[in-house]
Image (cartoon, grey):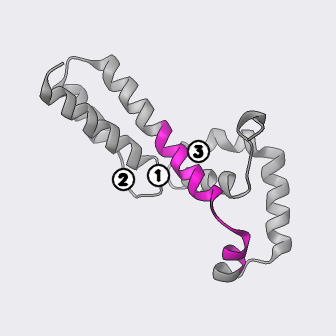
Amino acid sequence: MGVLEGLGLWGLFIGTFLAATVLPFSSDALYLAILAATDNPAGCLAVGTLGNWLGSVFTFWIGWIGKWEWIEKWFKVKPETLVRQKEKVNRYGIWLSLLCWVPFVGDVIAIALGFYKARPMGLPF
């Protein structure tokens, strides 16, 4: 792997990571450009997938560190509403996570899953 290809893959990683966060960024054109510039489609797929997955995990973590008090204070949401939403997320969380790829809505879902402390696939942490 040449230096330029390595830099391109790092750029692809950063681009796919940012695209999977709440930033309004799309990595599609970047992905196609790097794919066209390299002869390593498997590397592009691996790096793009890793960057996108880690960006989603980061977005989930942003929700995880959120506090109910902040939502109540800044967005004027009643505690009863938060409890009802938490019950729904607990019930449908695993299915909601399948929609995290949807543009705009997916980021909100990932943050909500983190905020309501949804357990990834029943894991104990």
Q: At label 2, which amino acid type do we have?
A: Phe
Q: Quadrant of residue 65?
A: bottom right
Query: Which numbered disc, 3 or 2, marks the residue that appears first in the sequence?
Result: 2
Q: Quadrant of residue 3?
A: top left
On screen, residue 81 versus residue 113, left or right, reads right
Residue ID at (40%, 44%): 17
Q: Secondary structure at mark 3?
A: loop
Mark 1 or 3: the one toward you: 1
Which quarter of the figure is the C terminus placed in? top right
On screen, residue 53 versus residue 90, left or right, reads left
Residue ID at (73%, 70%): 68
Mark 2 or 1: the one toward you: 1
Task: Please give the residue where the numbered disc 1 appears in the rendered image.
Answer: 21
Circle 1 Cα neighbour tier, 10 Å, few/some/many (<14 / 14–19 / ≥20):
many
Residue ID at (73%, 39%): 94
Residue extent of the magenta highlight? 53-72
Q: At label 1, which amino acid type do we have?
A: Thr
Residue 60 in view (yes/no): yes
Which quarter of the figure is the N terminus placed in? top left
On screen, residue 3 versus residue 82, left or right, reads left
Q: Are marks 2 and 1 in contact (CB under 8 Å)?
A: yes
C-alpha separation, residue under disc 3 versus residue under disc 2: 15 Å
Identify whether 100 is placed above or below 7: below
Task: Please give the residue where the numbered disc 3 appears in the rendered image.
Answer: 100
Task: Please give the residue where the numbered disc 2 appears in the rendered image.
Answer: 25
Query: Which numbered disc, 1 or 3, marks the residue that appears first in the sequence?
Result: 1
On screen, residue 77 versus residue 75, left or right, reads right
Q: Residue 30: percent from the left, percent from the top?
A: 26, 40
Circle 3 Cα neighbour tier, 10 Å, few/some/many (<14 / 14–19 / ≥20):
some
Q: Residue 112: percent from the left, percent from the top?
A: 66, 56
Q: Secondary structure at mark 2?
A: loop
